Image: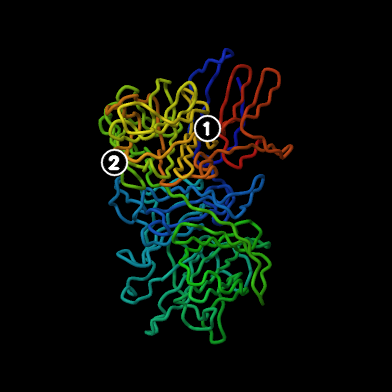
Amino acid sequence: MATASITPTRLTDTLSVTAISAGANYGGTENVIFNSAVGGTVQADGDLTGDGVADLLAVGGQDSLPSGLWLSAGQAGVGRTTGDGSLVGSMSDLGINGSGIDTTGPTGLGSPADYNGATAFSGQFTGSGLNDVLVYYPSGVHAGVAEVLNGNGDGSALAIAGGSTTTNALYDPFEASTPNNPVQLANAGCTSGVSVAGQGATCALPDLIGTSDDESGNKTDALTLYPSLGSIADFGRTQLSNPSPDGSGDWASWTLSTVQLPVSGGGSSTAMFLWDKATGVLDLWEGLALSQDASGNPDLVYTSYPVATGWNTGAVLSLRAADINGDGTPDLWATTSGGTTTAYLFSALSTTGAAAVSTTGSALAADSHSWPLTDAASGDTSASGTVAADASGGLTLTGDAGATWHTGDLFSPDVSLNGSSGVLAGSGPAVTTSKSFSVSAWVKPAAMNGGVVLSQDGTYGSGFLVYPTAAGWNFCMETGDAAGYAYNCAVAGTAQVGSWSHVTVTYDPVSSYMSLYVNGIEVGSATHTAVAGYTDGFQVGDQLYKGAHGSYFDGQVAQVETWNQTLTPGQVAALSNTTGSFVFPADNTLYPSGSQWTSGANSLSFNEGLMSVSVAGLRCTRWVPRTRRAR
């Protein structure tokens, strides 16, 4: 018997153990799904993945992002526990199940389009210790409505079911006829519970702050605090007398974004960036506290810092405040309409002059199509009814009798393909094979029968193929759509029967470069001259050869995604949640993929994101999350 101690890195975990005999023969694999206890842990402000680093949350339907609620994880430097300003880049849609505001999606609970026109930000809105998401609709059919979506702490899609969404009209119905719905909202922490600027406080549920019509009849906006009334998504309304930073009484041109900062005496305080797009003035108010002005009217007290002038004047930006690098000074992520995000890391704050700033840019990568292959959760488990909804692009995949839902494994459910007829077929293409694209999936082969996992049809053949063989993983692109069989192929890595692998392939037609990644590591490459065509169906489980489908895959598939761009190595590594190196705290040394250690008959190896321990003929394997340290 072998004993291993494992520290969970997610709230929902699956432990997979595969036995290997002394003769190197693989035995069965056992999987145990377990949930980690939240305990008394309180996530850091802005952290949605549980690693202590602030993450970027972005609403889709804008900034070149598809509809949804997109998460791009903040990236820590090697051996660090704080962010370095960069983002992982490959985004995941927390909102694939919708927001719960409507019930028009394929699961009956909504769709990513629910978030169109909304704003969203994170905070401790249910008091669980995990960061939840508050979604607010400033206009449209749901104007003035806010929702609190329970956080799950690990960056996976938010579950919208069974009352886990609290919907709340922010104002008393008697005021519904007045134009006082907030124009914008942000997390105000415990602002209403303190009266001294910079004082820390701990509160059960946070306040909100925003701007709204001041009801003067002059069509001017006022700064407004919405104190928590002690229940989830239940807020009061306190109009503040504070003038805007330019001294006027109108807040209409100012954009607000907040961050919660820990205070040495305990608790936290709220810092708020204020940006005037027209003039480029960027100010920072730290230590917000509720007080009264000389006339007895409620207002905020704070420490003011004139951070910058001429800052992105006239630009169309989405702002997200966070302590990105963990130095205690508020920073900003600014995302353009083209989807490029820049981290502005501020330091040397001054009450009389501009702050020092450094910048780090990241290109966001939202998938064009995404099939989580979890549709069986809606009750569809029949062999002939395997229909897989596209959470991003609307390209539904339809299966036949050889494609069935499978539960109880690393991904539960996933799709099992029988190797003789099973396939999930799309009615159209998912990528343009003559342009930049990327495709990824989690794959568990049941046999090395030459079956193709992913492909896209042309007239006679498939534009690209992804499949396992005894020689490794194969990524091939056809040199011409003809009755023959001619492909450029990258063959590398290790394909193992009974073992899950995350396989990603990318193509860049400008450089003609094909890349093959296994578990986040680039293992092979080839070159290919772009060929037009291949605009028929995207396939999971077979290929097209001489106009007929065949080469059926035998095994399981989960989480299939496509992108209309060439993902970078860092983005691919983030998709598999694995790392290209391993750190032992004892010597703080980075060990690359392929490292191995032995002690007598026992061995430890790290290869392509997989840590394997062999003890006297037994073997235990575990995926190593990115930035993971050995214990």
Q: Please determine whether, in this image, residue 45 is positioned above or below residue 494.
A: below
Q: Residue furthest top?
A: 23
Q: Looking at the picture, how far across and down is residue 588, in whole percent?
A: 72, 40
Q: Which residue is mark 2?
A: 428
Contact between marks 2 and 1 (CB within 8 A): the answer is: no
What residue sits 66% from the left and 59% below the top? 327
Which of the pair 188/140 is nearer the observer? 140
SS for dot 2: loop
Q: Looking at the picture, how far across and down is residue 423, in whole percent?
A: 31, 30
User: Dot 1: within a 10 Å radius of its alpha carbon, few (fewer than 14), some, or many (20 or more) residues?
Assistant: some
Q: Please determine whether, in this image, residue 554 is positioned above or below residue 321.
A: above
User: Dot 2: within a 10 Å radius of its alpha carbon, few (fewer than 14), some, or many (20 or more) residues?
Assistant: some
Determine which of the numbered discs, if any, sits on residue 450 in the image: none
Q: Quadrant of the N terminus?
A: top right
Q: Residue furthest bottom?
A: 295
- Residue 389 is drawn in which quadrant? top left
